């Protein structure tokens, strides 16, 4: 079918649906107008004040409904007009107009289809307080707390939220009533009259609540016409992708103090007066109203009774790991024993906390002089960054003042620490099914880990890494234990998890109880269809799924998440009635008419029967006993080093390898070998140690030793490098994708870059060319074995703990300690990172430690000028040590705290950091922990990017990972949303880094990690109105929430950022060769001066704390082959 006919067909179907909805809205408008007219006539016809009060509330509600229907009618007509324009025959050839209801700037939705980056494309900033509807009219966006306020007009979002919430509350209340009935039956059987009477009171109250919920639900169903904004349907087709929705991120329980002020209520539907022989007197017919505040279903406080719906009472409630507060209004007649609920309200604590945070941000934004990026662009800014000075440092005057002086912007910058003018939220909140209550709410979080802030708003903060739970494999499923903070349905037994721990498959997201996962024998979709699947049952009846519009509380039968309300992306089987997400439908087994529990029972029985048959057949067969024989390789067929190192073994060493084949060392023997002048090594070690004469970079197989020796240490090897790691660790250099340059670092294309030596850094050993006779192309282990015969003992350089004197503590982190050490023989200074083996084992950081070493080797391979180099690494019985070059100038966090950076200074550091990140990306590495604390400043004024603990290898263009890690202020939105992410996360962190260097504060602030995460996902960074346009532009493009549209996310990677006008006067070859004079050079009094490091650490004694535990031999095996020494470190 031609494309034009396809568009015409779907356009006709959509037009018919729109016409049907337009007619339905017309009818509802006519109905509401008649109700409004009748209500106004009733107001004129009766003098009864009670009737007039209720009728007035009815008129207000009808007017709100009428206004909503009229605005909905306008939106539907606008959609139809767009559809007609789109299906115009002149446009059918190239349908370029957006899909109906789809907004072009949808940064928060993170669409699955990658969008190419455009220079003038979407900014990616925080969605404005107003968006546009289908007609192009501004449409306000409300927070979750705003949606339950009484004065908020009816919107599609509000109606959808209330329908979802009321359906869920109604279902829970019905289950609660069933439980009460069962308990009442038990009490009756036991003869417990008191307990039975209490159960009866609860049953009556539950009946009343069910009636209230049904009444409210009916009202919102009458209002429901449109699904909640079709622009979100792309990412709502399935369950929250790896927790990707913001609501799931905020669903963690909160502890603290809830401060509630109950003021008054209005427009309540009070319970009717009960007239009986007991209540004949007027005093007994009086109704009193009180407010009950419940936390997670338990009543905590209750107001005094009032006959005027006014209370003015203040309460403070201690909350411990709670999600929701329920406020219920009761009527109690004096003559009656039990109260009657007349209205309910539910407030999520996370929504309240977010509303308070937003309130503070709005107060800060109103200080003046600071605006959003879009507003700054509209104002025109102050001109180009390069109006006056140039990158080389010539003086001039630009729009923001002297290029070499700190930028002075008008207005006080928002610090994130100013006290709120009024703490808490004061508003009228809607009560269901009718009325409103005036509350003042404030929540003070408990044990808030506030960020350490100095006067300029920047402070040190450690990195975080989420530990991956144990994986339980079951028939292809990879179950990981996960804590759910919402109601989840078990896909196996169809019972709720109810805020409990469950198991979820990492691949297909099948969710079940911890007790149920072992019973799951249905195959995971990730399991290859070509594999033999003998455990089958003949029940193969596919489900007949049909698209439904979900109006109610339904859960997916596969992933267990609640189906989104209203949207046409849910599926229901017309035969058995099960429901699921559209994206989960293909994962549901073809067991129509059979429950999953029954199907799994059948499969389990089949497995048992087949196992019994195999055992019986095995007993009948005569089989010799299997004696375990140790695997002994014959001397004439030794293991080839090609299997371990990816190289062919040279014939000249075959005999030597055979002779030394049986030499084996225990882990502790190896430890002694690493710390004493012995040349023995384990052939199967994880980290091969190159011979002392081997260069710090590999050469191609076609080169000889003499050729390799003529290449200076700082130069690039143009041929394919040999991988550093052996097959046991996984090769460091995998098969690269298109565009990867085998030489590793690729210079800019404009000017050929000469080989650069490392810059003069304090404490850095001098790198000299090795003599040709010491260079060998023999694989490292075989080379070591050969040296045992041909070299005298002690010739091989070994590094151990006894080679250093520790002088000071330079820093501490979440994963270790860094100390200043002096090498005894050379008197050179090094920074030594110390990690306890016990910590590495307990926290499953073995592979991470190995990876850190491989990244160090990659950084040292070409002696990149802006990456920290590695001298050696060794181990003791209790610890591992990374000996790194010592950079005595301190980190950028220290220097920006001392003095705000100038524009030239910030740009200078940003350029060098950009080249460091580019080198990592060209080698398939993402950094993931970019921050001021990890950028060191050498004495000659250049930067060194340090701390490779969070680096991830094999991350080429298009590769993704999902580990939750990083420093909170620098974490990209896709990391926080627990989505899969690529190397674009480094460019988000680079944008945050540039913002901090230019403006001296963080773009996303908060009192704790949760508030920082909310700010990253919700807030738009503010910029001074006089900030240069190009500076605002590059920050805006780097801080784009959609990773597919972020600057640098394309195949060009760093080249996209280099091409931005902010860097237009930068000669990148000159930056790489350190030809630009640095804007600032730190000073020290002596080589061991630590004044450029935090006194919190340097005042400590440089000692190693004793370790009382002893690792097993199996644990020690994890660190075999860790030791390594750089070729230039030999003396």
Image: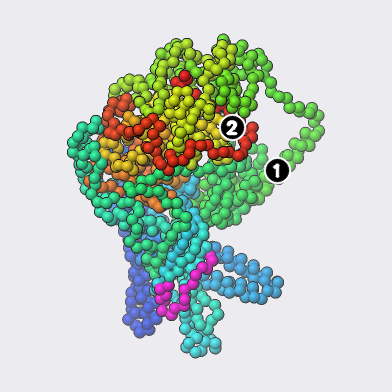
- The quarter of the image holding the N terminus is top left
- The foreground one among 219 and 725 is 725
Around disc 2, counting alpha carbons within 10 Å, would you say few (fewer than 14), some (14 to 19), or many (20 or more)? some
In x, y percent, where is residue 839?
A: 55, 39
Residue furthest out toward the top: 652
Q: Residue at x 25, y 54 (%)?
A: 368
The picture quadrant where one finds residue 655 is: top right
Sequence-first disc among 2 and 1: 1
**From the viewer's perspective, is 306 left or right of 137?**
right
Around disc 1, counting alpha carbons within 10 Å, would you say few (fewer than 14), some (14 to 19), or many (20 or more)? some
The picture quadrant where one finds residue 358 is: bottom left
Q: Residue at x 49, y 70 (%)?
A: 301
Let me know if residue 304 is in the magenta part: yes
Marks counted in the figure total: 2
Q: Residue at x 43, y 43 (%)?
A: 1096
Question: Residue 606: which numbered mark, if any?
Answer: 1
For label 1, the SS is: helix
- The foreground one among 521 and 1051 is 1051
In x, y percent, where is residue 926?
A: 43, 34
Which residues are the magenta region? 297-313
Compared to residue 88, the image places residue 182 above or below, namely below
In x, y percent, where is residue 269?
A: 44, 75
Let me know if residue 668 is in the magenta part: no
For label 2, the SS is: loop
Instruction: Identify residue for label 2.
Output: 877
Q: Residue at x 30, y 54 (%)?
A: 365
Q: CA distance from mark 2 to mark 1?
A: 51 Å
Q: Is residue 147 visible?
A: no
**From the viewer's perspective, is 918 left or right of 813?**
left
């Amino acid at each position: 079918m031609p494309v034009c006919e396809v568009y015409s067909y779907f356009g006709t179907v959509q037009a018919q649906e729109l016409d049907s909805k337009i007619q339905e809205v017309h009818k509802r408008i006519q109905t509401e107008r008649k109700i409004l007219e009748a209500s106004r006539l009733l107001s004129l016809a009766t003098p009864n004040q009670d009737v007039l009060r209720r009728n007035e509330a009815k008129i207000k509600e009808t007017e709100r409904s009428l206004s909503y229907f009229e605005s909905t009618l306008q939106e539907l007509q606008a959609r139809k007009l767009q559809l007609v324009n789109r299906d115009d025959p002149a446009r059918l050839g190239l349908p370029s107009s957006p899909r109906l209801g789809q907004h072009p700037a949808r940064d928060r939705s993170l669409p699955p289809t990658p969008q190419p980056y455009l220079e003038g494309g979407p900014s990616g900033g925080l969605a404005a307080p107003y968006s546009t509807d289908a007609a192009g009219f501004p449409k306000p966006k409300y927070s979750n707390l705003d949606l339950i306020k009484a004065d908020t007009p009816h919107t599609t979002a509000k109606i959808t939220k209330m329908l979802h919430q009321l359906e869920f509350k109604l279902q829970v209340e019905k289950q609660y009533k069933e439980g009460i009935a069962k308990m009442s039956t038990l009490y009756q059987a036991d003869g417990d009259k008191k307990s039975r009477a209490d159960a009866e009171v609860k049953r009556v109250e539950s009946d009343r609540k069910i009636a209230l919920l049904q009444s409210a639900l009916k009202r919102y169903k009458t209002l429901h016409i449109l699904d909640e904004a079709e622009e979100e349907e792309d990412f709502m087709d399935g369950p929250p992708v790896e927790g990707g929705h913001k609501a799931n991120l905020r669903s963690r329980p909160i502890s603290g103090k809830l401060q509630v002020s109950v003021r008054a209520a209005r427009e309540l539907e009070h319970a009717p007066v009960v007239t009986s022989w007991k209540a004949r007197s007027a005093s007994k017919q009086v109704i009193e109203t009180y407010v009950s505040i419940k936390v997670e279903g338990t009543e905590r406080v209750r107001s005094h009774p009032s006959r005027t719906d006014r209370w003015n009472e203040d309460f403070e409630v201690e909350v411990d790991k709670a999600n929701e507060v329920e406020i219920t209004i009761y009527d109690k007649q004096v003559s009656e024993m039990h109260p009657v609920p007349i209205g309910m309200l539910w407030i999520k604590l996370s929504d309240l906390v977010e509303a308070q945070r937003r309130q503070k941000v709005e107060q800060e934004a109103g200080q003046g002089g600071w605006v959003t990026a879009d507003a700054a662009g509209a104002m025109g800014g102050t001109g180009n960054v390069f109006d006056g000075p140039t990158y080389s440092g010539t003086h001039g005057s630009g729009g923001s003042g002297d290029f070499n002086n700190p930028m002075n912007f008008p207005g006080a910058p928002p610090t994130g620490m100013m006290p709120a003018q009024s703490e808490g939220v004061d508003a009228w909140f809607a009560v269901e099914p009718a009325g409103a209550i005036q509350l003042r709410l404030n929540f003070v979080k408990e044990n808030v880990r506030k960020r350490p802030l100095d006067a300029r708003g920047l402070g040190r903060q450690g990195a975080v890494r989420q530990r991956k739970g144990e994986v339980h494999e079951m028939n292809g499923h990879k179950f990981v234990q996960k804590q759910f903070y919402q109601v989840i349905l078990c896909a196996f037994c169809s019972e709720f998890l109810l805020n409990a721990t469950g198991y979820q498959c990492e691949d297909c997201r099948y969710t079940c109880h911890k007790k149920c996962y072992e019973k799951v024998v249905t195959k995971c979709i990730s399991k290859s269809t070509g594999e033999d699947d003998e455990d089958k049952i003949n029940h193969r009846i596919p489900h007949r799924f049909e698209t439904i519009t979900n109006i109610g509380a339904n859960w997916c039968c596969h992933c267990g998440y609640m189906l989104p309300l209203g949207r046409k992306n849910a599926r229901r089987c017309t035969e058995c009635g099960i429901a699921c997400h559209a994206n989960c439908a293909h994962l549901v087994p073809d067991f129509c008419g059979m429950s999953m529990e029954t199907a799994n029972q059948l499969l389990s029985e089949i497995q048992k029967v087949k196992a019994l048959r195999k055992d019986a057949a095995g007993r009948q067969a005569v089989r010799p006993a299997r004696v375990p024989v140790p695997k002994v390789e014959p001397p004439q067929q030794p293991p080839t080093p090609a299997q371990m190192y990816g190289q062919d073994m040279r014939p000249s060493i075959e005999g030597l390898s055979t002779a030394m084949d049986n030499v084996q060392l225990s882990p502790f023997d190896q430890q002694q070998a690493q710390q004493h002048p012995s040349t023995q090594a384990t052939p199967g070690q994880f980290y091969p140690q190159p011979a002392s004469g081997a260069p710090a970079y590999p050469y191609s197989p076609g080169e000889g030793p003499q050729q390799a020796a003529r290449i200076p240490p700082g130069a690039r090897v143009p041929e394919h490098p040999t991988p550093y790691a052996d097959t046991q660790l996984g090769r460091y250099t995998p098969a690269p994708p298109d565009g990867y340059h085998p030489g590793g670092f690729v210079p800019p294309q404009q000017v050929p870059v000469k080989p650069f030596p490392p810059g003069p850094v304090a404490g850095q050993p001098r790198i000299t060319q090795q003599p040709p006779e010491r260079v060998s192309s023999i694989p490292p282990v075989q080379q070591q074995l050969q040296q045992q015969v041909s070299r005298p003992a002690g010739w091989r350089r070994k590094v151990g703990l006894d080679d250093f004197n520790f002088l000071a503590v330079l820093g501490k982190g979440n994963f270790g300690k860094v100390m200043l050490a002096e090498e005894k023989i050379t008197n050179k200074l090094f920074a030594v990172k110390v990690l306890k083996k016990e910590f590495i084992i307990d926290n499953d950081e073995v592979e991470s430690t190995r990876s850190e070493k491989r990244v160090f080797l990659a950084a040292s391979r070409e002696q990149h000028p802006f990456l920290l180099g590695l001298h050696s690494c060794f181990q003791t019985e209790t610890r591992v040590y990374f000996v790194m070059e010592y950079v005595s100038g301190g980190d950028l966090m220290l220097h920006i705290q001392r003095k705000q950076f100038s524009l030239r200074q910030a740009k200078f550091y940003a350029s060098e950091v950009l080249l460091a990140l580019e080198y990592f990306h060209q080698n398939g590495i993402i950094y993931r922990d970019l921050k001021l604390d990890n950028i060191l400043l050498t004495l000659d004024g250049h930067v060194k990017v340090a701390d490779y603990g969070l680096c991830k290898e094999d991350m080429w263009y298009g590769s993704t990972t999902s580990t939750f890690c990083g420093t909170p202020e620098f974490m990209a939105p896709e990391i926080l949303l627990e989505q899969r992410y690529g190397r674009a996360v480094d460019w988000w962190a680079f944008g945050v880094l540039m913002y901090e260097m230019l403006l001296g504060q963080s773009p996303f602030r908060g009192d704790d990690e949760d508030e920082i995460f909310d700010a990253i996902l919700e807030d738009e960074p503010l910029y001074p109105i006089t900030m240069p346009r190009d500076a605002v532009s590059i920050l805006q493009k780097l801080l784009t929430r959609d990773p597919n549209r972020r600057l640098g996310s394309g195949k060009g990677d760093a080249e996209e950022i280099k091409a931005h006008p902010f860097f237009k006067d930068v000669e990148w070859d000159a930056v790489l060769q350190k030809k630009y004079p640095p804007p600032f050079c730190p000073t020290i009094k002596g080589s061991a001066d630590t004044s450029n490091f935090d006194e919190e650490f340097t005042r400590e004694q440089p000692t190693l704390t004793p370790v009382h535990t002893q690792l097993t031999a199996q644990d020690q095996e994890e660190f075999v082959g860790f030791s390594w020494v750089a070729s230039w470190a030999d003396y």
